[in-house]
Amino acid sequence: MIPLTGKVLVAVDGASGGRDAITLARMLAPASARLVLTNVYGVGVGAEADPEASRPAGLAGRALHRLARKESAELLVVGSSHRGPTGRTLLGGQTLAALNGSSCAVAIAPRGYGMAEPTVRAVGAGDAGTAESELAVRTAREIAERHGAALEVRAVADGDPVEELATMAEELDLLVVGSRAYGPSGRLLSGETSTALARRAPCPLLVVPRP
């Protein structure tokens, strides 16, 4: 599982997305963890440009990755897009950039998440029968136990995993999924499932890297 006992890097931008990220980081991290707030100046950390072609956001993502490695962070927490409905995650360029190539787990807070103290009653995880999803299940179990929450694990080997997990997430306070099952170990490489869930999830999303 992701221990989350060291440093948690939180991307803040002076807007509501930063507040959402701080609230989620406080929920995910135990009391022993250290929260490090950061803002990447001059490259549009909060910019919501085209996620497919966002140079400023890409630079911000790489800067966050470098800082996460320098700080030996176990988790990077970012806010969702400032656009879109409250209570939904919506990928902006910076959020997508943070999902690709991170050396640590990445959590995404839905828009408006910081408006109230979150209650954690149900934590879910997707199980695709891979080492990545096994790590996601163990991490979800640890977080659920810490909050006294119920744990739901959904097998996603058949059917449309995005649709199944997005539907399950309607009843969750946190969804945990694994990175795609190839690429360098210890890196977070967002595949189609995690990227699509980051666009659609109605609850916070935690993506763990390859073990």
Image: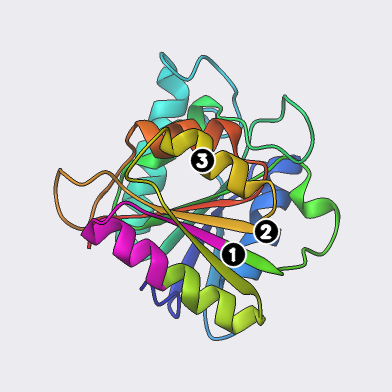
Identity of the residue drawn at 27% across and 57% down: 132
Extreme-front residue of the structure = 158
Give the numbered dot on residue 173: 2
Residue 125 lies in the magenta-colored region: yes
Tag nearer the camera, 2 or 3: 3
Work out how far the residue at label 2 is from the one at label 1, CA to CA, in angstroms: 6 Å
Q: Which residue is mark 3?
A: 164
Identity of the residue drawn at 37% across and 53% down: 67
Quick one: label 3 or label 1, which is nearer the N terminus? 1
Tag nearer the camera, 3 or 1: 3
Residue type of the residue flagged with mark 3: Glu
Identity of the residue drawn at 78% across and 53% down: 114
Identity of the residue drawn at 59% across and 33% down: 200
Work out how far the residue at label 3 is from the one at label 1, CA to CA, in angstroms: 15 Å
Q: Quadrant of the C terminus?
A: bottom left
Q: Does the residue at mark 2 contact the one at mark 1 (Cβ under 8 Å)? A: yes
Above or below 76: residue 181 = above
Quick one: label 2 or label 1, which is nearer the N terminus? 1
Q: Which residue is mark 1?
A: 123
Above or below 82: residue 100 = below
Residue type of the residue flagged with mark 1: Val
Extreme-right residue of the structure = 116
Label 3: how many Cα within 10 Å (few below 14, some 14–19, many 20+): some
SS class, disc 2: loop
> Is residue 40 visible from the viewing direction of this image?
no
Give the numbered dot on residue 90: none
Q: Which is more toward the observer, 183 or 173?
A: 173
Residue 11 lies in the magenta-colored region: no
- Identify the magenta region: 124-138
